[in-house]
Amino acid sequence: MSKSFENYQKRKLISSYFSVVLSIALVLFLLGILGLLVLNTKKMGDHFKEQITISVFLKDSAKEVEIDQMQKSLSMAEYTKKAIYVSKDEAAKQHTEELGENFQDFLGYNPLKNSIDVQLNADFVSPEQIATIAEEISGKGYVDEVSYDKPLVGLLTENIKKIGLWILIASSIFTFIAVLLINSSIRLSIYSKRFIIKTMQMVGATKTFIRRPFIINNIKLGILGAILALIALGGVLLYVNEHFKELGLFEDSTILIVLLVSVFVLGVLISFISTYFATQRFLNLRTDELYY
């Protein structure tokens, strides 16, 4: 009977530890994902901004020397990521592939113009800056027209700002919830040992002596939970990097190291603080209050 009860107690203890570790791991994993989003918000925004293209259409009278000079000057401009010359014949070929038929057959000529497609650096993608760039390019005598998607630029700029703001708000809320969840899990595990705490106190053990094994034990659980969270986070990072290489998640290793270390430290720190205050609460209770 005594052995059966002892086995039951061990299973209960293991179950309690498992629930604490699992809750810590899940919460830290979610915090890591949110941290990853926060740290890469600008990078993701820059990726979408750099898809914006300004098309510079050239007059048919433009000389080859002028076109070459134009492409070189645009390529060297600080706002340019890439400048690609597209001849009217290449443009006609692209349109034919997209439409599935050759429009020159019934028009009898190629109405398209030679152009230079300019991809901008993300820092210069805003309605005001692009308008200034377009006006500057339009001043060239051999430029016929400068075209870009104005509504898309405005919408993209506005939405990226909103997304960044909401990610910060969501991260703050989830961080607060995460602390509460980990704290609740640890408090519940200590609650089951409140009579042991009070018994040790009654036989003369100091508060520091009583707290120490609880703190050490829960820090170990916090470390284990943090390790599990880091393993899961590493798996997500590898998956995202494999399928979305353009984000370049592993290009800045410093950011990743800071994120992973922060998740680990946060797990240990929350475990320590929660355990300290949970044990302190039961140490300050009177014996008759333990039953409520």
Image (cartoon, rainbow, N blue to C red):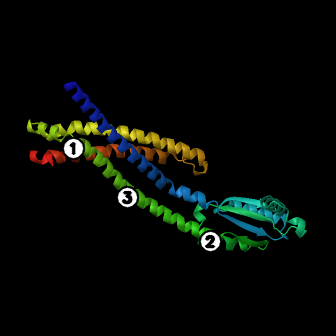
Between marks 1 and 2 in the image, the one whose residue lies nearer the viewer: 1
Q: Amino acid at mark 1?
A: Tyr
Mark toward the start of the polypeptide (2 vs 3): 2
Tell me the quarter of the picture where residue 260 sits.
top left
Where is 127 relative to 219, above or below? below
Q: CA distance from mark 1 to mark 3?
A: 27 Å
Q: The residue under label 2 is which amino acid type?
A: Pro
Residue 154 placement (x, y as % from top left): 58, 70
Find residue 173 and name its label. 3
Q: What secondary structure is marked by label 3?
A: helix
* Residue extending furthest toward the front: 1
Q: Which one is earlier in the sequence, the residue at label 1 or at label 3?
A: 3
The image position of residue 26, as x and y in percent, is 40, 45
Q: Residue at x 53, y 47 (%)?
A: 252
Residue named by callout 2: 151
Q: Is residue 154 left or right of residue 91?
A: left
The type of residue carrying mark 3 is Ile
In terms of depth relative to the viewer, which is nearer, 111 or 101?
101
Residue at mark 1: 191
Q: Is residue 217 visible?
A: yes
- Image location (x, y in percent) of residue 33: 46, 50
Q: Dot 1 surroundings within 10 Å: few (below 14), some, or many (20 or more)?
A: some
Question: Sequence order check: which comes first, mark 1 or mark 2?
Answer: 2
Q: x, y (%) of residue 148? A: 68, 69
Residue at 89% in and 65% down: 105
For the point 55% across and 47% down, the residue is: 240
